[in-house]
Amino acid sequence: MNDAVDNTWTECAIAMGSNLGDREGRLRGAVEAIASTPGVRNVRVSSFHETEPVGPITQGLFINAAAIIETTLSARALLERLHEIERTHGRERSDGQRWGPRTLDLDLLLYADAKINEPGLTVPHPRMHERRFVLAPLAELVPSWPVPHKGQTIGGLLASLDA
């Protein structure tokens, strides 16, 4: 597999969350791992937000944040790297459980203005526009970033949740 798109730097948005163990430490560790990835530069991170969990499973509060990066990696290679970072922090995605507690959750939200729909990779993230815990941190960094095929910016999507 060719991990790099080419030498062009592509701006991407990543959601981060944790609700097990040292939540803030895990997010800081994830940021360090992302920043040290070959083909990644200019990592910017939002403040940390403590949020209620989503879904039917009783669990502790999350710490959520967002990161904006530039990368020469393809969207698939970047997603694989995010999953590798999750595993180093004790996350196993193979358990099939959705919306459960997790040591670390890293989601690729946006890959520039690309629309990607492949097995295991959907960009823009299909539920980001419904989630305050994703949009609020992201709006700190890029409120005017248009979300492909939504007809609104990050800030506009966040404001629509209040409407």
Image (tube, rainbow, N blue to C red):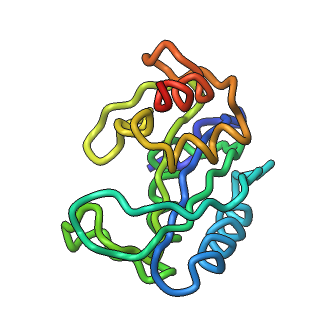
Compared to residue 12, the image places residue 113 above or below, namely above
**Looking at the picture, how far across and down is residue 55, in whole percent?**
26, 58
Residue projecting furthest to the top: 151
Q: Nearer the viewer, residue 104 or 80?
A: 104
The residue sitting at 52% across, 26% down in the picture is 157
Query: In screen coordinates, is 139 left or right of 57?
Result: right
Residue projecting furthest to the front: 163
The residue sitting at 45% across, 64% down in the picture is 105
The residue sitting at 44% across, 50% down in the picture is 1
Compared to residue 158, the image places residue 28 above or below, namely below
**Looking at the picture, how far across and down is residue 129, in whole percent?**
43, 33
Compared to residue 10, the image places residue 113 above or below, namely above
**Looking at the picture, how far across and down is residue 158, in whole percent?**
54, 32
Residue projecting furthest to the bottom: 21
Question: Which of the 4 quarters of the picture holds residue 25?
Answer: bottom right
Query: In screen coordinates, is 10 left or right of 135?
Result: right
**Looking at the picture, how far across and down is residue 91, in whole percent?**
40, 76
Q: Nearer the viewer, residue 8 or 59?
A: 59
The residue sitting at 59% across, 29% down in the picture is 154
Label count reads 0
Compared to residue 57, the image places residue 20 above or below, namely below
